[in-house]
Amino acid sequence: MALKTPIYDSHVERGGRMVEFAGFHMPVTFEGIVAEHETVRNKVGLFDVSHMGEISITGPGAVGFADRAVTNSVAGLDEGQICYTVCCNGKGRVLDDLLVYRFSDERVLLVVNAVNVEKIFNHLKSIVPSGLEVRDLTPGIGQIAVQGPASRDLLVSDPLFSRVAAGIRELPYYRFFTFEHEGYEILLSRTGYTGELGYEIYLPAKMARGVWDRLLDGGSALGAAPIGLGARDTLRFEPGYCLYGHELDEDTSPLEAGLSWVVKLKKGDFIGREALAAEKEKGPARRLVGLEVTGKGIPRQGFTVHQGGETVGRVTSGTFSPTLNRPLAMALVKRSVPKEAEGITIDIRGRAAGAVQTPLPFYKGSVND
């Protein structure tokens, strides 16, 4: 039976169309995908991301253990800094992509995809040394993403967050801080999945709905609106952000998916390092590319990509871009396909639709404002 997030009742009351996603009842739309997409690009939208997983690592050597478990450098983070990274198996294939929050040498938080919480938790438990504690905090935490050009203005106008307004205004990208409210720790990070200026709030589950409703109702003058999973996908697609189960899975390496920048081979040993080092030396078998469809139709995940009379890859994500007003796709293709290759087609339901390679990201927003 699907679970309900702490904000579920508010979604129903606000007209959200609910679907089952990653074991949770989640809103896929409220007003509609395009309208919600444009709200985040131009104003501010709120996402219930309480289905995401939070796993803590605490104890002496927490940072070192996290460094062994992921490909990016956790030891290189300052306290209060975050990194995007992947967790690989011994073959250098992706178990999950995640965020790592460094609180101190002895406290680290991993934020993982909802579909992979149990997998990553069990993986970490199987390799954790004695003296360290790995805990799944997910059930007790609510998570709200506030995204869009007006996200900062919305937060500093709220009674709870106005107390830390200076910290919010000064917070750099991929940094976080915590503060206390009624004896509970609240974490605020400048992160997101939309390509726009944005923040993510981690707070006790029992507080989540109250904060959600107050931000939405208090932000009406700024155009604040709830955003569903449908727009969340189009918003992450345009800036070329990977989605687990699409660009990333246990058959794909981070090098193939264009994530070589999160693979720090020089930091020391980590799970999958040997395989990734060999792959880097040889060259990945595939590469992630952006495609603009010049023919008719909208590309979708799994559609095959062709060039020179052969199948050279598959679409990992595809949609009609609301911002750019054209059909686009991300695809994993053989590395033998030249970057300037002509004659690329996508099989869209039995019809060959022309496509041309286009650089990723498709779109750059206000994320660094």
Image (cartoon, rainbow, N blue to C red):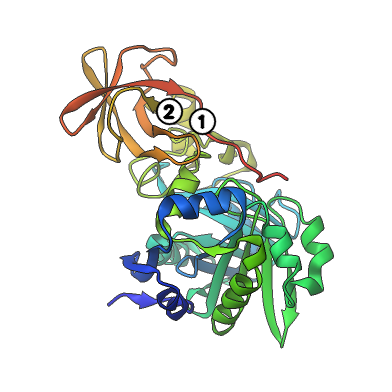
Q: Is 318 in front, or is 132? A: 318
Give the mark nearer the N terminus: 1 vs 2: 2
Q: Residue 154, image x and y in percent?
A: 69, 64
Q: From the image, which quarter does the N terminus lie in?
A: bottom left
The answer to whether marks 1 and 2 mark residues whose Cβ atoms lie closer than 8 Å is yes
Residue of label 1 = 360
Per the image, label 1 sits on a secondary structure element best described as: loop
Along the line of sight, which residue is nearer the eye, 360 or 140? 360
Quarter-of-image position of residue 322: top left
Q: Estimate the x, y position of residue 127 in percent, counting from the top left.
A: 47, 62
Work out whether residue 238 can be spotted: yes
Rendered residue at 77%/56% (across/down): 171
Q: Position of residue 70 (x, y in %)?
A: 54, 51
Residue 99 placement, left or right of 327: right
How dense is the environment of label 1, judged by Cα within 10 Å: few (below 14), some, or many (20 and up)?
some
Query: Residue at image x 48%, y 77%?
Result: 7
Q: Amino acid at mark 1?
A: Leu
Q: Residues within 10 Å of mark 2 (few under 14, many from 20)?
A: many
Q: Secondary structure at mark 2?
A: strand
Q: Is residue 203 visible?
A: no
Q: Please identify the quarter of the rendering in which residue 43 is found.
A: bottom right
Q: Nearer the viewer, residue 368 or 27?
A: 27
Name the residue carrying label 2: 289
Residue 169 lies, with reference to residue 11, above or below; the image says above
Horizontal arrangement in the rendering, residue 308 relative to residue 282 (left or right): left
Residue farthest along the bottom direction in this orientation: 182
Check residue 260 in the rendering and tell me which mark sits there, or answer none: none
